[in-house]
Image (cartoon, coloured by chain):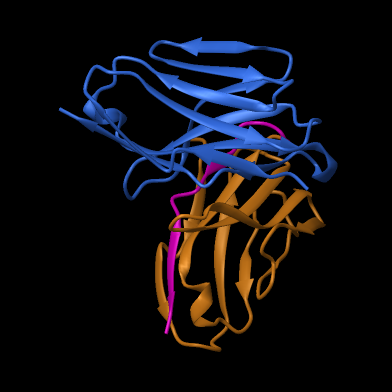
Amino acid sequence: EAQVTQNPRYLITVTGKKLTVTCSQNMNHEYMSWYRQDPGLGLRQIYYSMNVEVTDKGDVPEGYKVSRKEKRNFPLILESPSPNQTSLYFCASSQTGGNEQFFGPGTRLTVL
Amino acid sequence: GENVEQHPSTLSVQEGDSAVIKCTYSDSASNYFPWYKQELGKRPQLIIDIRSNVGEKKDQRIAVTLNKTAKHFSLHITETQPEDSAVYFCAASWPEYGNKLVFGAGTILRVKS
């Protein structure tokens, strides 16, 4: 089944404790992206990657890191999480930019 | 940069009525305009999309119209049903940045039965 997976689905952590949210797609898509969703603000892009080893900042990249060492994986790293990073996070992939994006199931992160 | 504004933020309609959600974009080079539906607790899923070489596209009860001159596009849902209740997001591509999608803030649609 073609899909985008994310782990974990739910995470409660404390300020400053490094964490990684994994994202994987099995559709051989070149383009992958991370979004955060907050009430009233829609989906804001954190980082995106147009292909392996190519990553670029989105609209809200501060406090986040990403890597794209393999085509299928695009992990999101929070080196030192803070409470303002409490949010719902979605990973998405598409064949290329400007095409249908397929979203993962979401990760709900709470930083205390 | 690209900016997408979406209105209204909430919309309540009676079952069977039509619903219209409107979006405007700022970059005249944008060429891809998808609409996503997000049910409560679920991920966004594409319901319809349109490219800049087409003015209108229809899929059963859902249609999207695009006015390139005015830089706005709209989602039309006819004969609404309770299962249409969800958050709807419009988006526009931004060619300058690899056609990344810029999303509107979303519209909460409530269909009252």
Residue stretch rendered in magenta on the structure: A96-112
Whole-percent x, y for residue A52 in the image? 79, 52
Return the residue nearer the eye: A83 or B112: B112
Whole-percent x, y for residue B44 in the image? 46, 41
Return the residue nearer the eye: A60 or A4: A60
Q: Can residue A72 be seen in this view?
A: no
Does residue A105 belong to the magenta stretch?
A: yes
Whole-percent x, y for residue B30 in the image? 75, 31
Left or right, A28 with respect to B78, comes to right
Does residue B52 belong to the magenta stretch?
A: no
Left or right, B61 with respect to B2, comes to left
Q: For the point 63% across and 41% down, which residue is it?
A: B4
Which color has been applied to chain A in this rendered view? Answer: orange
Q: For the point 74% across and 44% down, which residue is it?
A: B2
Q: In which quarter of the image is residue A95?
A: top right
Could you tell me how many numbered marks the image carries?
Answer: 0
Of all chains in the rendering, the one displayed in blue is B
Q: Is residue B112 visible?
A: yes
Whole-percent x, y for residue B73 in the image? 59, 25
In the picture, the quarter occupied by the C terminus of chain A is bottom left
Q: In which quarter of the image is residue B87?
A: top left
Instruction: Examine the rendered structure and indicate whether residue B53 appears above or below residue B41.
Output: above
Residue sitting farthest toward the left: B113
